[in-house]
Each structure stands twice: as C-alpha cells, then as structure tokens.
Image (spheres, helix red, strand yellow):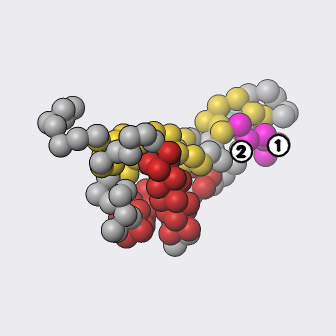
Amino acid sequence: MHEFGLGEEVVKTVLEEMKRLTPPPRNLRSVRVVVGALRRVSSEHLRFAYEVLTRDTPAEGAALEVTTVPVTALCRDCGWQGEIDEMLFLCQDCGAANLQTLQGMELFLDRLEVEYSDASDSE
Ligand SMILES: [Zn+2]
C-alpha cells in the first residue's frame, strides 16, 4: 500500500504549511491533493493513511479531498491528443503506442482550508 508513503509526504507538507501561516490556524478544515491517474493512488487508502498519520497533530480531523487528473497524451505518429486509458496506453485515433504523456503524473498539495476561530463562519 504505497499510499502510506504518499500520506506521510502529504501530512509533512500540510504541517509545514500550517506552521508557516501567521497567525497559526486553530484548525484545519480540509486538504486537497491533486494526483495523476498514473500514480495509481487509491483515494480511499490515501484518506485512511491521512487519518492515521494525522492523529494527535494539528492536521487531525481535516477532510482530505483527492482530485484525480486523467491521463492525456499526444500521439507522435498522427498528432492526436486526448485522454487515454492508462492501462492500454494507445492512441485513440490510430492505435499507435508512440505516445508522449502530457498529464497524469501530477502529485501536489492543491489547497488547505484553515479555521481561525470557533466562530461559526461555516460555509
Ligand atoms: Zn495516433
């Protein structure tokens, strides 16, 4: 389950980001990570890893949103460009395997939503 290693990275980055904010936020509401489909990450496993790894940290209890980016590629043979099946890796137009990957390897922290007080500014 490589999601655990990934979860560790995410949690580390989240905690660093939280420390950098002034004033320090009281609470973390949600975290959004963007993951390319080629990373083959199960968002369910990642959420579970996040939950376990943030126990007793300021990032505990935040909702983890995982946005998956589909794989897109450019065909070097016919110039077709678009979304492909990451398991097949073939041009959807001419069937060639001569593809250049354009998207699908992403892996980054997209957004942190923090809370500064108990005030009910709940949106
Ligand atoms: Zn093609």
Give the camera-side residue of 40 and 24: 24
Element on which disc 2 rests: loop
User: What range is drawn magenta here?
Assistant: 95-102
**Compared to 92, does 89 lie above or below?**
below
Q: Which residue is mark 1?
A: 98
Q: Residue furthest front?
A: 23
Residue 43: name its quadrant.
bottom left
Say whether mark 1 is within 8 Å of ligand 1. yes
Q: Which residue is mark 2?
A: 90
Among the two numbered marks 2 and 1 on one chain, the one whose residue lies closer to the N terminus = 2
Mark 2–mark 1 Cα distance, whole angstroms, equals 8 Å
Residue 122: name its quadrant.
top left
Q: Position of residue 69 (x, y in %)?
A: 54, 41
Q: Position of residue 40 (x, y in %)?
A: 56, 58
Q: Is residue 48 magenta?
A: no
The residue at the point 75 percent across, 33 percent down is: 74
Q: Position of residue 23 (x, y in %)?
A: 38, 40
Q: Is residue 78 left or right of residue 67?
A: right
Q: Position of residue 73 (x, y in %)?
A: 71, 37
